[in-house]
Image (tube, rainbow, N blue to C red):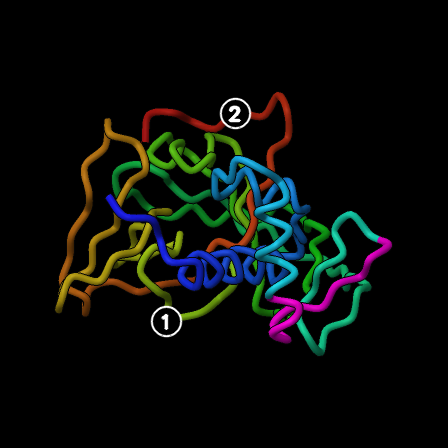
């Protein structure tokens, strides 16, 4: 298999850093290295510096997490996001609305009213590090891209899954081989939003059977 062109890798590095920045989680150079499996941290640094040269990122040389998007400030904007209840990560199940306070979130890149949090029940997304009991912070948006992790609603049933468009159908794909994909006509699926952050509180476990 041939090597991935440098431009394609750099595009993926930019998208990774951009998504982390919009989620309020600026990555370190080493985190970029780990995410792409680069053998040397210098390779990750070279991609980031080229993105700075191209004007797609701005660098603060005095910070470990010093990359940001042009036109944004370095200071976080913390808001209180409502925790609206539970969402299944398994088979479709009824969405449980059970407001449970607020969660402080860096809302840079998204209006505060567009964010909400849900606690995950089930194990279908463990392959991407979403465990039972985790909190997912979701940005409300009806349109998402293939590969985005979303909270989707089918009639009164909800789930958190990886989104894939299949022509006129939508595949809600688990990230655990023990679970099967869920496929529906697109008209029957409503995307409530995209998962932009995952938080874990040690000692908290959600139900594993859904």
Instruction: Give the image location of residue 40, x and y in percent.
Output: 58, 37
Who's the residue at 44% across and 56% down the image? 9
Going from the N terminus, do you reach mark 1 or mark 2 first?
1
Say if 12 sits above or below 175 in the image. Answer: below
Q: Residue at x 37, y 37 (%)?
A: 125
Within-10-Å neighbours for mark 2: few <14, some 14–19, many 20+: some
Residue 91 located left or right of residue 199: left
Q: Nearer the viewer, mark 1 or mark 2?
A: 1
> Relative to the observer, which residue lies in front, 205 or 52?
52
Q: How many marks?
A: 2
Give the image quarter of residue 93. top left
> Which quadrant does the N terminus fall into?
top left
- Which residue does the numbered mark 2 point to in the structure image? 205
Who's the residue at 40% across and 52% down the image? Answer: 149
Q: Residue 105's quadrant in the figure? A: bottom right
Q: Residues within 10 Å of mark 1 (few under 14, many from 20)?
A: few
Q: Residue furthest top?
A: 203
Residue 163 locus on image (x, y percent): 30, 55
Element type where label 2 sits in the image:
loop
Q: Nearer the viewer, residue 20 or 49?
A: 49
Q: The residue tagged with tag 1: helix, strand or loop?
A: loop
Q: Which residues are magenta?
A: 51-62
Q: Which mark is residue 143?
A: 1
């Amino acid at each position: 298999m041939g090597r991935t062109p440098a431009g394609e890798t750099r595009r993926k590095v930019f998208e990774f850093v951009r998504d982390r920045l919009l989620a309020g989680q600026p990555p370190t150079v080493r985190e970029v290295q780990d995410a792409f499996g680069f053998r040397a941290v210098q390779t990750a640094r070279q991609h980031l510096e080229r993105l700075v040269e191209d004007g797609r990122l701005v660098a603060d040389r005095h910070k470990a997490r010093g990359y940001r998007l042009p036109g944004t400030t370095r200071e976080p904007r913390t808001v209180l996001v409502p925790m609206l209840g539970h969402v299944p990560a398994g088979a479709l199940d009824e969405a449980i609305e059970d407001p449970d306070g607020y969660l402080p979130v860096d809302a840079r890149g998204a209006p505060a009213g567009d964010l909400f949090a849900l606690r995950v029940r089930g194990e279908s997304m463990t392959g991407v590090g979403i465990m039972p009991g985790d909190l997912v912070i979701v940005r409300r948006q009806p349109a998402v891209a293939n590969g985005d992790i979303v909270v989707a609603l089918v009639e009164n049933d909800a789930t958190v899954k990886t989104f894939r468009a299949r022509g006129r159908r939508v595949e809600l794909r688990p990230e655990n081989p023990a679970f099967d994909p869920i496929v529906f006509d697109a008209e029957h699926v409503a995307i409530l939003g995209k998962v932009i952050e995952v938080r874990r509180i040690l000692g908290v476990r959600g139900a594993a059977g859904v």
